[in-house]
Image: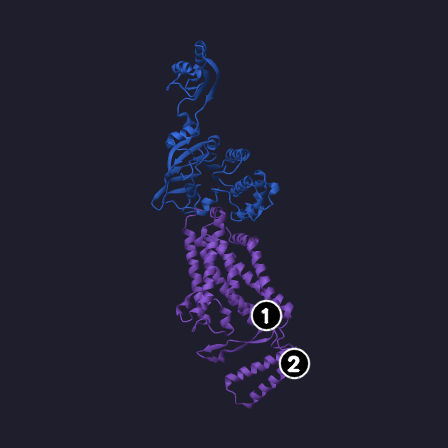
Amino acid sequence: MRFAPLVENEILKLLKRRRFRVALLILVALNGLIVFAQTQAKDRRPGRDWRVEAQERVARMQNWERSGRLPQTQLRWVRFEIARMQYHLDRNVDPEAISGPLFTRAFANASSYLLLPLLAILFAADIVSSEFAQGTVKLLLTRPVGRARVLSSKFAALVVAITLTVTLGGVVAYLFGGLAFGYRGWGAPVLTGFRLTGETFDPAAVRSLPLWEDALLAFGLAWFAALAVGVIAFLTSVVLRSTAAAMGTMLAALIAGTILPRVAPSWEAQRYLFVTNLPLPDYYSGSPAPITGMTLPFSVVVLTVWALAATGVAYAVFLRRDVLA
Amino acid sequence: MEPAIVLAAEGLTKRFLKREVVSDVSFEPAAGEIFGFLGPNGAGKTTTIRMLVGLARPDRGRVRIAGFDLARDFAKAMSRVGCIVESTDLYPYLTGRENLLHFARMLPDGAESRIAELARLVSLESRLDDRVATYSLGMRQRLGLAQALLGAPDLLILDEPANGLDPAGIREVRQLIRHLADERGIAVFVSSHLLAEVEHMCDRVAIIHRGRTLAMGPVRELLANRGAERLVFRAQPADRAVEILSAFSRDAAARAEDGETVSSEVPHERVPEALAALAAAGVRVFGVERQSSTLEELFFEVTGGETV
């Protein structure tokens, strides 16, 4: 018995249902709304000539560079800033202006807390429980296919659905962002790798990347966070056998994750909760950690441990439990 | 030649918490046989069926299908089985064809090529590309049956196949099941709480009540053991008729059911004699009706009068 047809079944069931179209609609509507809001807010300093400003800035920094009095770390930053300004001057693009690619990159950060995890939950919370609710689980588990394979095929379909959602999110953000702010600018250099060491800013790890590479990394991290949430929602779907209960549980967890670091930043143990570790792309662009001391590798490990544990429990429960629905 | 045993349930027992809902149930339907599993709602029928198809694990006992132990060789055993458990639940947002394709993909190669033939068999060809959400209950039941037959099974397990069907639908399903058993030699295991259904369709029957098998055997034998068939006379005056007919009755005396109905157990060969005697005594006979004893009566007897 081959595995691919089973995955095909599960993907078919995911895509044929209304909730996939709803997810797509949410992505389109939300992106459209944000882009619209931003076009209303742009041009806050009318009458400014960005070319003059940028040229002055380059000249100033070239002076600093030549003076030879800058420490090594600052010198790196100054050189990078000159290159960045030059890039924008060469292409006649305002470095302060938002572009389609920049908007897309910002979407990765903004959507990793709530939107993408939410969509992951939308699929995962229902993938097993809906079979119980419809009664189709009785047909699904009386085929000449072991339960582990049935669950694995659902798992694979979930990974595909989440990957597809994150990708579509990026594509939709780029289409809308480009429509409003222009489609070009993937090559613009961006600074990355900022780190706060204690109270001071540590520029040692700062690197320059082209925007497309930076965006790809950010989306990769957002995908990983969404996947971890999806796997945990998958577990609740298996255990609770009710889509509503699974969704409710996961939403409560997500909300707790956004509130806790704000109301109780001194509670250190929350760093081991999966919800506190979701904004992975934020680390990467240099925002302060939700709880002091948390780092990107730490969060990746915490999410991985949660996901693996959830997978283990989901299989153990699904393989053993009598189906009496 | 003895027909091959397709399904063997041996001492199946299932407990929920402390309560034993199925106790030591065994049966062995053979190829080409329609085996009825009869019991009131809550007797343990559905739990037993769930153990037969691997949805629930028995606490004791085991299930073998086509020689394979269900617990150890699940995939091999289940490749010989088609089943409908409880209700025919299919994916409402998929079409009939998509549903069949879905389940065909979970079977060894070749199942997909049977879809057209099976759609014809259950008369769903014209609606196969409509979504199941638009199907009537009877159509869903038939699609469920097509689904169960996709893998060309040796054993068909049907839980309450008549549920929700109108009389015409019940008849249709019954004929289809009979056809499958007779023409294709499929063993059919049918659970039901409807006595008439089992009586008309099944070759053998097991009666289950409170998780225990109370009686098992060929339907005819089970009924025959209950003695002679009864004759019901419509005659007046009834008390006179009772007197006369009691003399002809084999075991029990005749008794008056109401003002003009008298039931008796007059043997077949003595009926003309009895009629002559009635006429001679001036009893006016309006009709005689033969009433074979039914599974229903047997059922009342073995379950101690509990209604179905």
Three-letter amino acid code at the position of disc 2: Asp
Q: Name the residue under label 1.
A: A103
Residues at discs 2 and 1 both on one chain:
yes
Q: Name the residue under label 2.
A: A49
One can see residue A206 in this view: yes
Q: Nearer the viewer, residue A249 or A71?
A: A249
**Label 1: chain letter:** A
Which residue is painted at 42% across and 27% down in the image? Answer: B223
Q: From the rendered image, report the letter of the chain displayed in purple.
A: A
With A61 as the anchor, is A269 left or right in this view? left
Q: Within 10 Å of the Cα at label 1, are there few (<14), some (14-19), or many (20+) other Cα atoms?
A: many
| Residue A6 coordinates in the image, percent (x, y) | 52, 52
Q: From the rendered image, report the letter of the chain displayed in blue.
A: B
Give the colour scheme of this rendering.
by chain
With B50 as the anchor, is A30 left or right in this view? right
Which residue is painted at 49% across and 69% down in the image? Answer: A280
Choose mark 2 or mark 1, whichever is in front.
2
Which residue is painted at 41% across and 55% down in the image? Answer: A316
C-alpha separation, residue under disc 2 versus residue under disc 1: 23 Å
**Label 2: chain letter:** A
- Which of pointers 2 and 1 lies earlier in the amino acid sequence? 2
- Asked if residue B150 is positioned above or below residue A257 in the image, the reply reads above
